[in-house]
Image (spheres, rainbow, N blue to C red):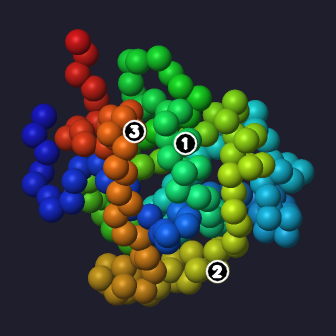
Amino acid sequence: MAQEKSAVPYHQIRALYDDDSITVYQAYNAKIADEAVKQQTLKVPGWSSERMTWIKPSWSWMMNQSRVLAIRMSHSSFETILLKSSLSNSSQEKQPVRVQWDPERTPSTKNKLPYRSIQIGIGRSVAETWAQDMILSIEDVTEKAQKMHEDVEAGMSEDELAEKYIEERVYEIKDEELRKIIRLDSLEDHETES
């Protein structure tokens, strides 16, 4: 299936990161969010490793959530998790981590873009280690999400929203095995059945 021409690759990881870490986002209820920030761990009352927990590097997806946490982890931890993944829509053997390539949206989330952003589901066999050993820091960024929502409602343009709120840039993965596992270079979402 031919894809619409775009300067952006169909699958691309865009994230807020520096030399030491990458930031992913999660939404939680107030009780878990407060304790997670206070204790700087997700291993708090109410959090469970028994169900899949989804993380997203894409900020725009978090705007309408009640509480939003920015979770920093090392590059090696991020890529270690991805090495344990399989695509959600894959016919291959399922791994403890799931990867979905969801349609990216403009900063207001009102319009879909012709390329995809990664969403990562961490299964219970990995979630405990992730929560306990792989998180460097947790920050409550709910206020930023609320301000962005207010600016969207006030009619701020997509370009202005992007300039004010979107700090992501392309996150390069050089490991060829990992690129293949997450289908980073794929031009479509569904694998061809052999």
**Sequence-wise first label, 1 or 3:** 1
Upstream in sequence: badge 1 or badge 2: 1
Label 3: few (<14), some or many (≥20) within 10 Å?
A: some
Q: Considering the numbered disc 3 on the image, is that residue within a helix, a strand or a loop? A: helix
The residue mark sitting in front, 1 or 2, is: 1
Quadrant of residue 37 within the rendered picture? bottom right
**Quadrant where the C terminus is found in the figure:** top left
Q: Are marks 1 and 2 in contact (CB under 8 Å)?
A: no
- Position of 57 with respect to 7 (left or right) is right
Query: How far is the residue under mark 1 from the one under mark 3?
Result: 9 Å
- According to the picture, the residue beneath numbered tag 2 turns out to be 143
Determine whether, in the image, residue 27 is placed left or right of residue 90.
right
- Whether label 1 touches label 3, CB < 8 Å: no
Pointer 1: what residue? 80
- Provide residue 119's location: percent of width, then percent of height: 47, 48
**What is the three-letter code of the residue carrying label 3?**
Leu
Q: Nearer the viewer, residue 18 or 7?
A: 18
Label 3 sits on residue: 178
Query: Where residue 92 sits: x, y (%)?
Result: 41, 18
